[in-house]
Image (cartoon, grey):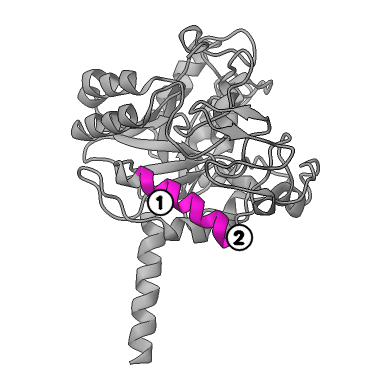
Amino acid sequence: MQLVILFCALSVTISSVIGQKNNHFAEGRNTIVHLFEWHWDAIASECENFLGPKGFAGVQVSPPNENSVISNRPWWERYQPVSYQLTTRSGNESAFADMVRRCNNVGVRIYVDAVFNHMSGTSGRGTAGHSSDIGSLSYPAVPFKSNDFHSRCHVNNYQDAKNIRNCWLNGLPDLDQSHDSVRKKIVEYLNHLVDLGVAGFRVDAAKHMWPADLKAIYSSVKDLTGHGLSGKPFFYQEVIDLGGEAVKKTEYNSFGAVLEFKYGAELGNAFQGRNDLHWLVNWGPEWGLLAGTDAVAFIDNHDNQRGRSPAILTYKNPKPYKMAIAFMLAHPYGTTRIVSSFAFDNFDQVKKYLQMV
């Protein structure tokens, strides 16, 4: 009897982990489109009028939770959480729920950019009117208090896993996800989004959180409830691993998918003449990439398209950029993701119509 119980428990655990790598695409569809900084009502229309009819599978949306209001409203204020209430310049909770419903109705899944490694690094009011105080580490709308955070140190040594995961990234107060109270608040947030019908989560800054903590959080999130959805949410994690650092992507792929940053860097080199294209004959894990079942593949994203790496192709180099995207969409590797962003001339710039929202 004990062996039977143990076998059943192991079966449930394995099924849950596999489920967390399931992208839940509707049959016959493929590719996630990151509609970076789009309004919820605009995304709903895009699902109904273009993405659905054209066979796209999903949309990654910008963080929907309340964030700090930063001077000149840069795009990165969306990564400065004040609370987990769903009010941002993209819209309120009602508009978000309507978007998810309308997209699901046409077979397009919604994946939320989930930010819970840290809280806002500024003091003041957020997009829902709630306060934050970095001095006292007070975020009363969650609530989080000073004992919910790691001690004040800065991420400055990428050869030290403890520094990467326990210190503050870019001055952002680092939540301690080993605390049950912190996990509970994060799970409540993710469960609320599941209740609204989302299919999964892009986990921001996963590299800066301990794998065991993330595994515990994911396993506590409820099963999907949206139209046509069932099983565990799809978790795909931001773990930047180009080699040579202490934190490895292979520490995270046993319990969720991982964003494969090496994919875009290597293809960028290939389509800019730095690698012969015939070398792509064995494109995939033999290049040091994760197995396709564990990976989300992309050419660029909202971060690295603003970076300085010559390997990363963006819309500013249109011909090889389109060629690399075409290769990615045609090649049978991973869950593919493309980005629909906006033109920019400086790092902080955001869409003009969003600046004052």
Residue 29 in sight:
yes
303 w.r.t. 261: above or below:
above
Mark 1, residues whose alpha carbon is within 10 Å: few (<14), some, or many (≥20)?
A: many
Of residue 162 and residue 274, the one placed in the foreground of this image is 162
Q: Secondary structure at mark 2?
A: loop
For the residues carrying marks 2 and 1, which lies nearer the camera in this image? 2
The structure residue drawn at horizontal position 44% and vertical position 60%, both measured from the top left corner, is 219
299 with respect to 227 (left or right): right
Residue 183 on the magenta span: yes
Residue 21's tag is 1
Residue 331 x/y as whole percent: 39, 34
Residue that label 2 marks: 179
The structure residue drawn at horizontal position 72% and vertical position 34%, both measured from the top left corner, is 170
Of residue 206 and residue 196, the one placed in the foreground of this image is 196
Q: Secondary structure at mark 1?
A: loop
Q: Which residues are magenta?
A: 179-193
Residue 266 in sight:
no
What amino acid is labelled 2 in the image? His
Residue 319 x/y as whole percent: 49, 11
